[in-house]
């Protein structure tokens, strides 16, 4: 193949690729050699079929395997789960309310989302509210803020900002992050009732 000869802008005395003046050209012969080497490395149809690509190892072009990663391995598929909703003193009971969650894991990274909706028969327990991670977190991941969301007071149509803090054993404590910066309870930052919402999404490190 014919090439137009040009100067190599990287070939100079001030960088690791250089050692000469900037007028040293990349020759057509050098480019032909590179093309021939790559062509030889992929000449076998079997090498292409097995997912190999040409790689320069410092002295020759060689074939190197490439691992094919499926969509499920990348965590593009989300898995549904029912997030437990508990409290530090007396657990709430959803009744005809709803608890919906899903998560995906990519390596050690777990991404999750949770939606709790209060129903007409929901009871609200007492103490600070807790949600639970879908997968056990790493020991060193505790005490970190791992998610954001909001609390929705349906009676006033008002939203309150929410942060999730990772406690031990996969518990997520809930913090109202407006001026109060208080733990969320059955009466804080408002008294929970029918159609109110708790929603949280975030990321943490798996065990």
Image (tube, rainbow, N blue to C red):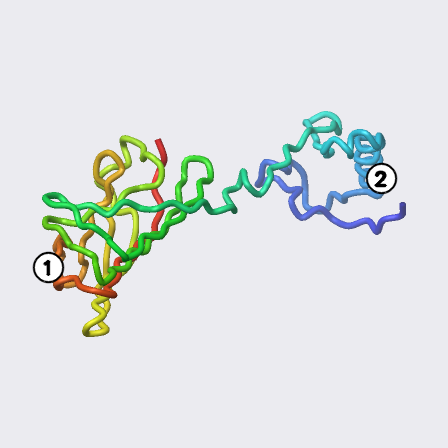
Q: Quadrant of residue 20?
A: top right
Pick the front one: 40 or 180 = 180
Circle nearer the viewer, 1 or 2 = 1
Give the percent coordinates (x, y) of residue 197. 26, 61
Q: Secondary structure at mark 1?
A: loop
Q: Residue at x 31, y 41 (%)?
A: 133
Which of the two labelled residues, at mark 1 and mark 2, occupies the earlier sequence position?
Answer: 2
**Residue furthest out toward the right:** 1
The N terminus appears in which quarter of the rendering? top right
Would you say 168 lies left or right of 1 here? left
What label does residue 4 carry, if any?
Answer: none
Q: Relative to 101, is 50 above or below?
A: above
Would you say 52 lies left or right of 164 here? right
Give the percent coordinates (x, y) of residue 183. 13, 52
Residue that badge 2 annotates? 32
The C terminus appears in which quarter of the rendering? top left
Pick the front one: 29 or 176 = 176
**What is the count of numbered marks?**
2
Q: Residues within 10 Å of mark 1 (few under 14, many from 20)?
A: some
Q: Residue at x 84, y 43 (%)?
A: 28
Tag 1 near tag 2, CB within 8 Å: no
Q: Residues within 10 Å of mark 2 (few under 14, many from 20)?
A: some
Q: Quadrant of residue 108?
A: top left
Residue that badge 1 annotates? 187
Q: Residue at x 81, y 42 (%)?
A: 27
Q: Secondary structure at mark 2?
A: helix
Give the percent coordinates (x, y) of residue 53. 72, 34
Q: Residue at x 79, y 35 (%)?
A: 38
Give the percent coordinates (x, y) of residue 136. 32, 34
């Amino acid at each position: 193949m014919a090439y137009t000869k040009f100067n190599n802008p990287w070939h100079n005395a001030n960088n690791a690729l250089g050692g000469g003046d900037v007028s040293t050209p990349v020759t057509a012969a050098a480019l032909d050699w590179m093309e021939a080497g790559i062509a030889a490395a992929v000449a076998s149809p079997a090498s292409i079929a097995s997912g190999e690509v040409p790689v320069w190892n410092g002295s020759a072009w060689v074939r190197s395997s490439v691992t094919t990663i499926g969509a499920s391995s990348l965590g593009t598929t989300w898995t549904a789960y029912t997030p437990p909703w508990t409290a530090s003193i007396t657990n709430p009971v959803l009744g005809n309310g709803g608890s919906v969650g899903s998560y995906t894991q990519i390596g050690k990274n777990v991404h999750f989302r949770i939606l709790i909706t209060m129903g007409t028969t929901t009871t609200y327990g007492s103490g600070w509210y807790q949600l639970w991670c879908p997968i056990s977190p790493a020991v060193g991941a505790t005490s970190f803020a791992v998610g954001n969301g909001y609390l929705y007071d349906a009676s006033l149509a008002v939203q309150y900002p929410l942060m999730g803090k990772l406690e031990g054993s996969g518990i997520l404590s809930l913090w109202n992050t407006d001026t109060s910066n208080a733990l969320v309870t059955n009466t804080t930052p408002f008294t929970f009732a029918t159609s109110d919402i708790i929603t949280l999404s975030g990321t943490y490190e798996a065990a």
